[in-house]
Image: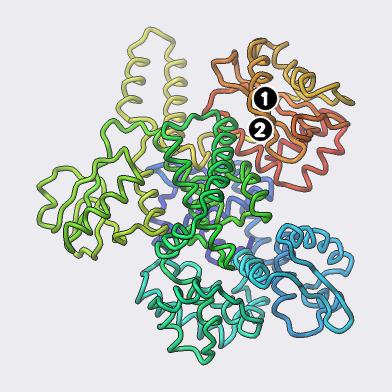
């Protein structure tokens, strides 16, 4: 996490404001776009969370504020951050990827001493870090080696080494421009590639990869002197036929077809590659992928207590995407998502769920999924969550505007219908026809429109690219509302006309307005409905530490007992949890060593409650999965979503998980979880 001067400026502005400060005021003050502001706010929230401060409060139509109790602490934090700006220290995760970058790019004999000198850390720290690095290598089936002449180096399939290398730059991109690291990444040669990519972007696919040009320019420059990746004749012939290949070939001094082809391969229109991968599909492989995707969807439904209305369509779309990703990966192409941070922020709940179920794909591919890939999969799920939770009575009206002919217009209309089958799609050929169709929610056009219209306009390709789909997803989800102001006014009116104590009326009205403000700013993807840490949700009397359980059924019953004793759940709720595990398998193991036991609200939730069982000896579930920590949750679906997001953050914090394994009293467990 790198704190820039702009981020400090934004935090200072929010801190000095009384009450809520609108987003447009912040944008104008620091001269940035809404998307950049969202990314900066996410970094600010991460920083506040790491310093045990409340995250920013966001309310639609009001803006952003900080809690009064934290205002003084934030001012103190600002002073510390300003002092430390030029002394950025890499986190263990960042160091792991920095080792990858150094080992692949540094031409010196990279010894332990030299690495320690470059990163200003001890040799012991590096050796400890290399344990994690070797696990990463094992995942990708490459090896980390060391000898006196070469120092540290990687061996294995060059395509895979390059994938890991590009992954490292993606993970390190936020520190690329930090003064103390900048010279390691950026050079005159990388700037040459940067200019080339901007020119390509403008000519072939406007905006399709401009968000990652900094990463790709460093990557292409650094692979110049590595051994070539050799493509199959069929694939190389296909690449050489593309205009992107010819464009690059004319501008590079290196005329080797495999080298130029490798660069072009990363920049060819994704629809062309998808079409090529589909033509080469093996039916057995496709069936395998469909089965894996089906398991992912099933687990995600069970964990989130959701039933997708159009499950078959979701599986079909995900299967096609994964098949395309498989083709890219096998040929050394890593998929990059220009909207990664925006997806993580806007669809945080779904993104975390996808991470939980991604082990199905990781086991199949024999590699970990990078954040960009998880974000693409998240978008597929996000559209189907929208279908479930949308409260919009009328279908969304989308106008497809293609002046190039009926065929192109029909092609785009079909693409949109496949993407959003709940929308009403209208075709037209000119802007002049716009007013004939009444209210329109969104216009999709294949050519730029200069006229000012009364609804959002998106310029897209006739065959939608991933970039196009992301932008359409964003607009579709922005139409959803959770609570209407009219409904709130009606409730307040009823309270005011009722025969109850005036103070109670006043307090109740204030509480409803507060709740409604939260509801208006909440959607299931951002999990911002309630900002209560786990310490405020878990009663310490519901935490147990036991030596062991005879079997997983006994463990589930033990974990649920505090909730049963307090009459927060009925016995039927426990039976429902046990039946679900017997029927669907150990889907409740959502993190190594951690089980999340739950059932639906109608199965026997009497009131809200969370219990925790810590076992000193792990209990075996089915399929050799074990757990030492069992959470039992009795909750409504909306609260459950918020809790699950917080729990996933807890599980991903390695230090906290180590401490939970060591914790031997309810008090120690409570102190650990209360920070999340």
Left or right relative to 50: residue 377? left
Q: How are the colours assigned in the image?
A: rainbow
Residue to which mark 2 is pinned: 587
From the top left corner, tell me how far across and down residue 88 is, in percent: 69, 68
Residue 340 seen in this snapshot? yes
Residue to which mark 1 is pinned: 581
- C-alpha gap between disc 2 and disc 1: 7 Å
What is the number of callouts on the image?
Answer: 2
Residue 92 location, quadrant: bottom right
- What residue appears at the point 45 percent right and 64 percent down from the top-left corner? 273
Q: Secondary structure at mark 1?
A: helix
Split into 4 quadrants, where in the image is the N terminus? bottom right
Residue 136 location, quadrant: bottom right
234, above or below 133, in the image: below
- What residue appears at the point 46 percent right and 16 percent down from the top-left corner? 503
From the top left corner, tell me how far across and down residue 170 is, in percent: 59, 66
- What residue appears at the point 35 percent right and 76 percent down from the top-left corner? 203
Which numbered disc, 2 or 1, marks the residue that appears first in the sequence?
1
Between 597 and 551, the one lying in front of the other is: 551
Residue 94 location, quadrant: bottom right
Q: Secondary structure at mark 2?
A: loop
How many residues crowd mark 2 within 10 Å: few (<14), some (14–19), many (20+)? many
């Amino acid at each position: 996490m790198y704190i820039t001067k702009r981020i400090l400026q934004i935090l200072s502005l929010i801190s000095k404001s009384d009450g809520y400060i609108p987003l447009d005021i912040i944008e104008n003050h620091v001269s940035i776009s809404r998307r950049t502001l969202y990314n900066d706010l996410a970094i600010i929230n991460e920083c506040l969370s790491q310093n045990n401060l409340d995250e920013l409060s966001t309310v639609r139509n009001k803006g952003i504020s900080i809690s009064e109790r934290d205002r003084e602490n934030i001012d103190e934090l600002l002073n510390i951050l300003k002092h430390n700006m030029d002394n950025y220290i890499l986190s263990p995760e960042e160091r792991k990827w920095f080792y990858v970058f150094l080992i692949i790019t540094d031409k010196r004999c990279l010894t332990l001493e030299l690495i320690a000198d470059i990163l200003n850390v001890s040799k012991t720290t590096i050796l400890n870090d290399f344990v994690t690095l070797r696990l990463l290598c094992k995942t990708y089936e490459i090896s980390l080696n060391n000898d006196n002449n070469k120092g540290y180096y990687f061996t294995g399939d060059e395509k895979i080494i390059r994938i890991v290398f590009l992954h490292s730059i993606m993970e390190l991109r936020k520190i690329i421009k930090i003064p103390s690291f900048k010279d390691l990444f950026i050079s005159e040669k990388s700037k040459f590639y940067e200019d080339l990519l901007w020119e390509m972007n403008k000519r072939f696919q406007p905006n399709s990869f401009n968000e990652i040009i900094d990463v790709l320019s460093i990557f292409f420059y650094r692979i110049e002197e590595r051994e070539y990746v050799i493509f199959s004749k069929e694939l190389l012939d296909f690449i050489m036929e593309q205009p992107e290949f010819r464009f690059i070939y004319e501008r590079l001094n290196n005329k080797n077809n495999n080298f130029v082809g490798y660069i072009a391969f990363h920049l060819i229109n994704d629809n062309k590659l998808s079409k090529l991968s589909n033509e080469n599909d093996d039916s057995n492989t496709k069936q395998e992928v469909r089965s894996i995707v089906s398991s992912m969807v099933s687990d995600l439904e069970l964990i989130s207590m959701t039933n997708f209305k159009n499950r078959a369509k979701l599986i079909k779309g995900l299967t096609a995407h994964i098949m395309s990703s498989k083709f890219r990966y096998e040929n050394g192409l890593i998929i990059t998502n220009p909207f990664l941070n925006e997806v993580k922020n806007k669809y945080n709940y779904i993104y975390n769920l996808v991470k939980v179920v991604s082990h199905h794909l990781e086991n199949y591919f024999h590699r970990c999924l990078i954040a960009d890939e998880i974000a693409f999969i998240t978008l597929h799920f996000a559209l189907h969550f929208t279908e479930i939770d949308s409260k919009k009575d009328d279908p969304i009206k989308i106008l497809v505007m293609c002046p190039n002919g009926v065929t192109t217009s029909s092609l785009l209309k079909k693409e949109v219908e496949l993407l959003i089958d709940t929308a009403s799609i209208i075709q037209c050929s000119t802007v002049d026809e716009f007013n004939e169709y009444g209210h329109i929610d969104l216009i999709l056009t294949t050519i730029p429109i200069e006229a000012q219209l009364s609804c959002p306009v998106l310029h897209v390709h006739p065959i939608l690219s991933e970039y196009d789909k992301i932008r359409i997803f964003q607009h579709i989800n922005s139409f959803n509302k959770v609570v209407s102001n009219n409904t709130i006014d009606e409730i307040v009116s009823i309270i005011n006309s009722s025969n109850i104590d005036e103070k109670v009326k006043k307090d109740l009205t204030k509480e409803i307005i507060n709740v409604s403000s939260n509801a208006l700013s909440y959607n299931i993807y951002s999990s911002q409905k309630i900002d209560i840490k786990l310490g405020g949700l878990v009663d310490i009397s519901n935490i147990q530490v036991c030596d062991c359980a005879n079997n997983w059924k006994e463990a589930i019953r033990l974990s649920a007992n505090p909730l049963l004793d307090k009459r927060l759940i009925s016995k039927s709720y426990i039976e429902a949890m046990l039946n679900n595990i017997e029927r669907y398998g150990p889907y409740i193991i959502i993190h190594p060593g951690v089980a999340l036991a739950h059932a639906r609200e109608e199965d026997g939730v009497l009131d809200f409650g969370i219990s925790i069982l810590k076992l000193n000896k792990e209990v075996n579930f089915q399929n050799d999965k074990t757990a030492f920590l069992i959470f039992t949750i009795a909750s409504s679906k909306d609260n459950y979503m918020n809790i699950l997001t917080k729990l996933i953050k807890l599980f991903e914090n390695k230090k906290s998980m180590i401490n939970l394994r060591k914790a031997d009293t309810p008090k120690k467990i409570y102190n650990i979880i209360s920070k999340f």
